[in-house]
Image (cartoon, rainbow, N blue to C red):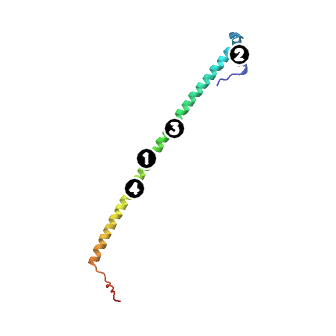
Amino acid sequence: MFDFSISELMVIMVVALVVIGPERLPKVARTLGHLWGRAQRYINGVKADIERDMAVDEFRQLQQKVQAEAGELEQSFKQAAQTADQQVQEINEAVAKLSSADKAAPAENPSPTPPISKSE
């Protein structure tokens, strides 16, 4: 994150030793360490929250896509069922016409075969 060389760190430590003093320097360093750790934990928490929110948004988008696909599939099934129902109805109408034509045909045309007698 920060680009410090060893020589720059040595200069900062010498200046801190002169300004703060040797008695308070360990306490200040400890306090800065604690603050640095808290800041890192806070930043990591914020990153985790952002990643979690992004994952929730991705799941919502995926859910919407799945629901849209399910709706299209349901519509396709309904259309196929309507087509099948229409075809069944047409077949039933054709069978009804044929059966009515068959019933009318024997009455008009008697069969040419003689009846079989039981005496033989």
Q: In this view, does 43 lie to the left or right of 70?
A: right
Please determine whether, in this image, residue 26 is positioned above or below residue 71.
Answer: above
Element type at mark 1: helix
Sequence order check, earlier mark of 1 and 2: 2
Marks 3 and 2 sit apart, C-alpha to C-alpha, by 47 Å
Residue at the extreme left of the image, as rendered: 108
Horizontal arrangement in the rendering, residue 117 relative to residue 28 (left or right): left
Give the residue type at disc 2: Met
Q: For mark 4, what is the residue?
A: 81
Cα–Cα gap, marks 4 and 3: 34 Å
What amino acid type is highlighted by mark number 4? Ala
The residue to which callout 2 is attached is 13
Is residue 83 rendered to the left or right of residue 52?
left
Check disc 2: other Cα within 10 Å, few if <14, some if 14-19, many if 20+: few
Asked if the residues shown at circle 3 and circle 1 are in contact, with their CB atoms under 8 angstroms apart, the answer is no
The amino acid pointed to by label 1 is Gly
* Location of the C terminus (image quadrant): bottom left
Label 1, on which residue? 71
Q: Earlier in the sequence, mark 3 or mark 1?
A: 3
**Residue pointed to by mark 3:** 58
Q: Quadrant of residue 18?
A: top right
